[in-house]
Amino acid sequence: MTEKEADTILEEMMANRDELTRRQWLVGTALALALPGRRAWALETIRQGFQTNIWGMPTYYLLKSGLLEKHGIKFEEFAVPSGNLTMQQMVARQVDLGTYAAQSFIIGYDKGGLVAIAQIETVGKTAQIVTRKELKLSKVSELKGLKVANQTGSSVGNIFTDVIAPAAGLRKGDFQEVRMDVNNMVAAMAAKTVDAMVNVEPYNAIAVAEGIGTSIMDFSQVDKMPVFMAATPDFVDKSPETAVAYLKCWQEVARDFKDNPGKVADVIYAFFTSKGYAMSRETFTKALTKVEVDPGFPTDLAQGLQKDAEVLLREKKISAIPDWKKALRPDLWAKAKS
C-alpha cells in the first residue's frame, strides 16, 4: 500500500468514525502506527520570525490564516521591526524561520549557515528614500550634509550605503547617518530630528499621505529585492518533513494573494491599525500593492545573489562568497510541489 492510499483510508475513517465498530477502529489505529513518520505525528513546532513592516506581512497572513494548523503545524511567532533582527535571532538559533532580503540572507549564511528554502516576494518598490517635504529635494546627491535615518545592518540600509549613495557621489561622511528602527522614522521626520529616511512600506506611504515627506526614489531602480524564507540548517536537517509541509502552506498563501486579495488586505490592515497607525485604507492599499508576492524557487537565484555577495565582500561585511549549493535548498520546494 502506498502512503497516498493509506492517507485516503485514514481520512475516510476519520470522517466516518462515529459509524465504526470498535474492531474497525482498532484496525485503523494499527494501520496508522504501522506507517512511521506520518504527517500528523512527525511535524515539529516551528519558531517563526517576521518583521512588522510590509515585508513581513505575507508571513503574518500565513500565521493568521489557519493554513499551518490545517497542515498539522504548530508555531510560535517572533515579531521584530526588521528582517535583519530576525536573521540575528536565527544565527543565535532562537528562531527557526524568517524572511529578509538578499543582503541579510547572505550575511546570515556567512555568520550562521542559514539556508534559503523559498523566495516569497520581491519588494524593491516598497523600499524608498523619503525626504522632508519642506526641503523640496529631488535627488539623492542633495542629501549631502543632511541627517539620514537608516536602520544600519538591514538590507535596505546596506543597499543605500553600499550602492545608492556612492552612485550619487556621496561618500561615507558626506551625510550624517542616524541609526534608527524603521518604525520610528516617520515620527523623527515629523519632529525634524532627521531630514530624510531610508525606509519601507507602509511607513513611506504614511509619511507622504500625511504631508511629512516626499519620496525621491524607490529601490526597484537598482534592485528588485527578492525576499527569502530562510531557515536554520538545524531545522531543515532535523525535520525536512515539516519544512515541506510548511512550504505547501505557502502555495495556498500564494493563491489567497492572487484570488482573494480583499481577505488578505483585511487581515494585514487590521494588524497595522491595531498597532495604532492612523492609516487610511487607501494609503494602506497603495503600500500593499508594491509587494509582489509569488512564492517559489526561481532557477536564477544564485546569479543575482552573487552580485549582492560581491558588494558585501568588498565592504567587508562577509568573510567569503557563499557556497550557493549549500545556501540554496530548492529540493524542499520541489518536494512541496510534487
Image (tube, rainbow, N blue to C red):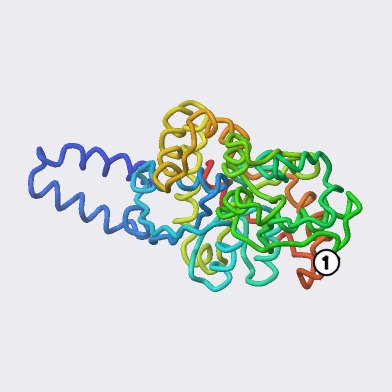
Q: Is residue 50 left or right of residue 46?
A: right
Q: Is residue 108 left or right of residue 15?
A: right
Residue under the point 50% across and 43% down? 250
156 vs 278: above or below: below
> Could you tell me residue 84's position as x and y percent?
61, 61
Residue extending farthest to the right is 169
Quarter of the image for residue 174 reads bottom right
Quarter of the image for residue 144 reads bottom right
> Could you tell me residue 322's position as x and y percent?
75, 64
204 vs 323: above or below: above
Q: Amino acid at mark 1?
A: Glu
Q: Is residue 193 left or right of residue 89?
A: right
SS for callout 1: loop
> Could you tell me residue 211's position as x and y percent?
62, 36
Visible in this render: residue 330? no
Q: Is residue 333 left or right of residue 268?
A: right
Label 1 crowd bin: few (<14), some (14–19), many (20+), radius 10 Å:
few
Visible in this render: residue 178? yes
Residue under the point 69% across and 57% down? 150
The residue that label 1 is drawn on is: 315
- Of residue 57 and residue 234, the one placed in the foreground of this image is 57
Residue extending farthest to the left is 22
> Could you tell me residue 259's position as x and y percent?
48, 26
- Of residue 102 and residue 16, the one placed in the foreground of this image is 102
